[in-house]
Image (spheres, rainbow, N blue to C red):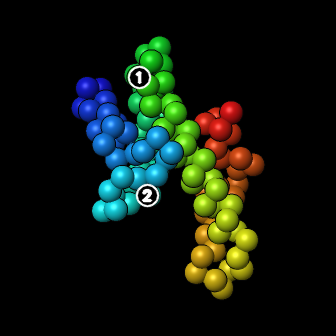
Amino acid sequence: MPYAEGLIDNQFNFYVRADGMIWHTSEALPASARMLTLLAMHHSYSGADGSFALKYFAKAKALAELLAGRHAASLQHGSPDPRYIRISAVDSLSNPLQFILK
């Protein structure tokens, strides 16, 4: 677990801003979005009290809201438009970010 905590610490301390945007342009937004999954998996596997996950909750929530907003904006365009993004894994869920956006 210390290695995973180090990765998560590094990502949220040096790459994710308080508003959910990414500091460095070379860091792709999808890679940062994957960190939301890693943070949730760490919390699930560690069995800890949640204090580690809560340390980055504000940034994780901001990142999730940014991703949800971008996804919603992309759905306003038709499928021939390159701005249209349909995520098949999300389609089967009523609200995939419901646990973070509460």
On the image, the x and y values in percent for residue 56 come to 45, 31
Q: Residue furthest bottom?
A: 80
Instruction: Give the residue drawn at x 66%, y 85%.
Output: 80
Residue type of the residue flagged with mark 1: Phe
**Closer to the camera, 15 or 4?**
15
Q: Tell me: residue 58, above or below residue 94.
A: above
Relative placement, left or right, of 57 versus 77 is left
| Image quadrant assignment for residue 35 | top left
Read off the residue under disc 2: 29
* In the foreground, 17 or 8: 17
Determine which quarter of the picture holds residue 86: bottom right
Tell me what residue is drawn at x 42 percent, y 45 percent: 17
Any part of residue 43 in sight: no
Callout 2 touching callout 1 (CB < 8 Å) = no
Considering the numbered disc 2 on the image, is that residue within a helix, a strand or a loop?
helix
Q: Which corner quadrant of the image does residue 30 belong to?
A: bottom left
> In which quadrant will I find the C terminus?
top right
Where residue 2 appears, as percent x and y from the top left, is 25, 26
| Circle 2 crowding by C-alpha within 10 Å: few under 14, some 14–19, many from 20 | some
Residue at 63% x, 61% y is 71
How far across and down, in percent of the image, does residue 68 sit? 63, 53
Q: Secondary structure at mark 1?
A: helix
Q: CA distance from mark 2 to mark 1?
A: 22 Å
Identify the disc placed on residue 52. 1
Q: Earlier in the sequence, mark 2 or mark 1?
A: 2
The quarter of the picture where the N terminus appears is top left
Q: Position of residue 28 (x, y in %)?
A: 38, 60
* Depicted 78 relative to depicted 1: above or below: below
How crowded pointer 1 is (Cα within 10 Å; few <14, some 14-19, many 20+) is rated as: some
Q: Is residue 7 above or below residue 73?
A: above
Quick check: can you spot residue 68?
Answer: yes
> Does residue 42 appear to the left or right of 57 in the view shown?
left
